[in-house]
Every structure is written in structure tokens, then in C-alpha cells.
Amino acid sequence: MPRHNWNPLIVLLLAVATSGGGAVPATAEVAVFSNRTRERLTVSVLADGTRPQPLTLAVGESRPVFYRQALRVRYSEGLVEHGYQVAPKSAYFFTRGQGDEPLRMEQIGFGRNKPAPSEPAPPALRLD
């Protein structure tokens, strides 16, 4: 029977690769955004301190955004810049209200909608 001289590093890499990596499963947070305006809407999302990415929502469209630690949403209304820290496992909608009211982002909650917080949201409570 032939004898193989295996490099210990190759053996270790093969063991890790075939065992599923032995890594802790990655976790992600999610926030859902909905466009309740009468026009197409583009806002900026900043996930985990990365560069701003555009999030475009058609009228009536809802889309999830996945992130690991922190998510901020920014948009401009005229000369005013709005920025919000998003709470994990939450849903938000953009609306103008009646008439020509400014664009606003509100968090969807049980029983009542509330304005999105402009300060960092408290960490999520995890029940294991």
C-alpha cells in the first residue's frame, strides 16, 4: 500500500472543510421598509458602518434589509437631512401624510405607529 506524506496544514484544512468549518452560525438582524407614498422613493442605508447604499422602493413596495450589528437610514427632504438608527427585527414605512407634508419614516408597532427614533435604539432583548 502506498504511503503518503501529508502536510499537516493540508490535513487540518481538509478536516475543517469537511466538518462544516466548526464555526458558530452567523446571525443577522433584519429591518423591513415599506413605501406608502405616491412616488418612487430612494433612501440610503448604512449597514454596519459601511458606505451608504441606495434602497429604492416602488410605490407600495416593501423590502427587507439584512445587517449584522447596526443599520442607519438617511434621506433628504429639501435642504433637511434626516438620519435614523434602526431597531433590530422591526418594520418601518415612509409616508407623506395628507397634502404636501414632508416625507417621514415611522416604525410599525402593535396597536399604533410611532415616529422612528433619531437616537440609537436600545439593544434587542434576546431570550435563549
Image (spheres, helix red, strand yellow):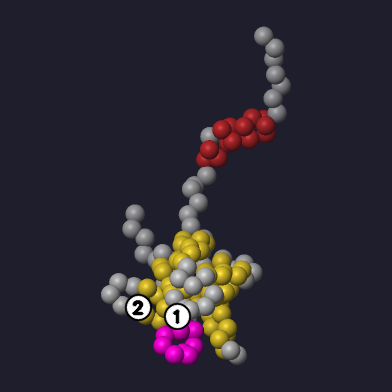
Quadrant in which the C terminus appears: bottom left
Q: Point out residue 8 in the picture as x, y percentages from the top left corner.
A: 67, 30
Please identify the dominant SS of the magenta region: loop
Question: Left or right of 43: which side holds 99?
Answer: left
Does label 1 or label 2 sit earlier along the sequence?
Answer: 1
Q: Which residue is mark 2?
A: 113
> Which residue is under mark 1?
95
Q: How many marks?
A: 2
Residue 75 in the image: state x and y as whole percent: 56, 80
Question: Observer-nearest residue: 103 or 120?
Answer: 103
What residue lies at 54% left-to-right and 83% top-to-bottom? 82
Which of the two discs, 1 and 2, sits closer to the camera? Answer: 1
| Residues in magenta, as a range | 95-104
| Residue 6, image x, y percentages | 69, 25
Name the image quarter holding residue 91. bottom left
Residue 30: image x %, image y %? 46, 62
Amino acid found under the numbered disc labelled 2: Asn
Marks 1 and 2, how far apart at CA: 12 Å
